[in-house]
């Protein structure tokens, strides 16, 4: 495949009905599109069929994208399909929420700068001013929105206003140390990702790695998940885990934990923007990626 050749992603879910594969492949065939990567999963529990197809146009001229959308949409109605067609070269707009810890933010910004994440970052929002210089280094607008218990509704309203103004596709909580309200979680359903360490629920509260050290923990890790009103219990996208031993002091445990957090979060963002994640009730369907 030519590196400059335009590629597309068709993804979504439908009722588990005879003919759904013909719907997908038939429409692509009629529009002279070659599907070079296909993933499907049939969930018997909910009788839904999940699909993700990467394809390229091999005909003359350019793909008649509106015709493909129209034909697929007309036929998809009979299958109760929820679907998305995306030009792979179009980056998702990602708003990042962060507090004082910078390891996840640093990692996302670096990956974005070298093209490892197909995203655009129109805004970084924080309840602290500490990371403004980092945002300025990458020439990204930084919004400092302090929060107290009394001002939480107004602060969240300001966050929501920014998200809408930049037309964000995804919101990433890169160690944002505030609990989002149920209303905000509802607004961001399916398009907000959070990261937390794997020591929950065993080691809650302050200094979880110090608690883990006292108990002689042998594994540390991180979980990246979609945001839900149940704190740190949203549908899981990906997890990372690393072995540790008796030589790991609390500081070394913290460092190892931060490494797993940034890697898990970056992977989850990549899976989401490549349309490899599908919400399926309280769980996610995640197709493999490169």
Image (cartoon, rainbow, N blue to C red):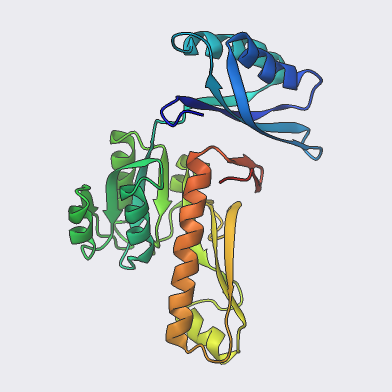
- Foreground pick, 214 / 28: 28
* 153 with respect to 284 (left or right): left
Q: Which of 147 and 233 is in front in this view?
A: 233
Can you give x and y, in whole percent of width and height, for residue 286 in the image?
63, 45
Q: Which residue is drawn at 46% across and 42% down?
A: 188
Whether residue 87 can be seen here: yes
Locate residue 68, reporting x and y percent: 55, 12
Residue 54 drawn above or below residue 163: above
Q: Quadrant of residue 166?
A: top left
* Image point (51%, 29%), residue name: 1
Q: Residue furthest front?
A: 2
Q: In this view, does 185 lie to the left or right of 151?
A: right
In front: 148, or 18?
Answer: 18
Q: Where is residue 208 in the image (x, y as percent from the top left)?
A: 50, 80
Residue at image location 20% in from the left, 59% down from the top:
132
- Residue 8 position in % (x across, y down): 51, 26
Say left or right for 114 vs 251.
Answer: left
């Amino acid at each position: 495949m030519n590196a400059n050749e335009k590629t597309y992603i068709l993804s979504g879910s439908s009722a588990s009905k005879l003919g759904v594969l013909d719907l997908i492949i038939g429409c692509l065939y009629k529009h002279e599109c070659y599907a070079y990567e296909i993933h499907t999963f049939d969930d018997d529990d909910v009788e839904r069929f999940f699909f993700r197809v990467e394809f390229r146009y091999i005909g003359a001229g350019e793909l008649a994208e509106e015709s493909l959308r129209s034909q697929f949409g007309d036929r998809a109605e009979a299958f109760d399909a929820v679907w998305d067609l995306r030009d792979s070269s179009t980056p998702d707009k990602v708003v990042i929420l962060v507090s004082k810890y910078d390891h996840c933010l640093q990692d996302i910004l670096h990956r974005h700068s070298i093209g490892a994440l197909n995203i655009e970052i129109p805004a970084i929002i924080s309840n602290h001013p500490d990371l403004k210089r980092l945002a300025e280094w990458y020439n990204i607008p930084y919004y400092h929105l302090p929060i107290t218990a009394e001002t939480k509704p107004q602060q969240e309203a300001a966050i929501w206003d920014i998200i809408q103004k930049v037309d964000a596709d995804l919101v990433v909580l890169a160690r944002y140390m505030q609990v989002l309200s149920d209303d905000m979680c509802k607004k961001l359903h399916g398009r907000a990702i959070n990261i937390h360490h794997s020591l929950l629920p065993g080691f809650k509260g302050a200094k979880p790695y110090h608690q883990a050290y006292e108990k002689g923990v042998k594994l540390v890790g991180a979980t990246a998940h979609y945001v839900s009103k149940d704190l740190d219990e949203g549908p899981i996208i990906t997890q990372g885990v690393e072995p540790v031993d008796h030589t790991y002091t609390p500081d070394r445990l913290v460092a190892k934990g931060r490494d797993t957090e940034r890697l898990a979060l970056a992977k989850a963002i990549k899976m989401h923007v490549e349309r490899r994640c599908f919400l399926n009730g309280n769980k996610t369907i995640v197709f493999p990626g490169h």
